[in-house]
Amino acid sequence: MSAPAYKRILLKLSGEALEGKAGNGGIDFPTLGGFCDEIVQVIGMGVEVGLVVGGGNIFRGANSEESGIDRPTGDYMGMLATVINALAIQASLERRGISTRVLTAIEMPGVAEPYIRRRATRHLEKGRVVIFGAGTGNPFFTTDTAAALRANEIGAEILMKATKVDGVYDDDPNINPKAVRYDSLDYTTVLSKKLKVMDAAAISLCPGQPAADPGLRLDPTGQYCQSLAMCRCRHPRQGTITNMSDPIGQDRTKRWPKGQASKRNGRILRVRQPGC
């Protein structure tokens, strides 16, 4: 197997991805197990993995006001939901022999370690999967923002977001069958076109920082692992590369033929090959 393109990655996993195909809320443990099986393969390649997980499968703070709960309280409830997911992922990984640590932005002695940046990077250096729970620890900030923040703090080379779709679209592909998927983007296009792959606060943390790859689909067939590992010969139709270092005003939506690479300032943004 070819060497991975990145040594340290930060993966953002949406809570909804843990629901499985039924989408009835909660945690679908076969789906969770399939995801953890792929993480095991990635660890075996020598990749250091940090993970931020959402809590939308259990409770979404942004929707709390509809139930008569004030937004800050709802957000704190959502943070607790992310910790539930984090503990489930930890237990599943450790059953597979992978050492993990859950670090939370809200201190929970007896449940998880408090988030300390140096502690997190030390765990990664020792080959442990680090799962970041409770978002940023502050209301009004999403777990997308937490993922962008943690990626910067731990020095991740790339931020990946795993959702139920296979890339960034100009509209919701589950609702609009004519929605167009982008192969590559720059951060200003994401903001100006109000693409809803990540919130604006998260995107604003990314310019000049490691590239982001939103829209990697959780797929038990193994294609997801192939993209997560970022092998040199990347699956040609998997995900969208969002080059957060592109100059303002550059449109990176051009589609490139298979076997060619798009480049900017001498750096390969995306390589497309006929197979992997």
Image: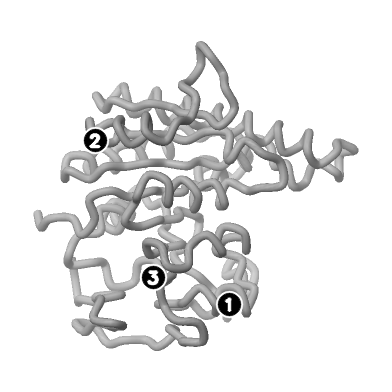
Mark 2 or mark 3, which is nearer the start of the sequence? 2
Q: In the image as oriented, which residue stretches furthest toward the right? A: 68
Identify the residue shown where x is 63% and y is 48%.
142
Figure check: 232 above or below 190: above
Figure check: 101 above or below 56: above
For label 3, the SS is: strand
Q: Which label sits on residue 236?
A: none
Q: Amino acid at mark 1?
A: Asp
For label 2, the SS is: helix
Q: In the image as oriented, which residue stretches furthest toward the top? A: 110
Q: Badge 1 local density, few (<14 within 10 Å), some, or many (20+)?
A: some
Q: Amino acid at mark 2?
A: Glu
Tag 1 residue: 170
Mark 1 or mark 2, which is nearer the start of the sequence? 2
Tag 3 residue: 241
Viewer-nearest residue: 131 or 58? 131
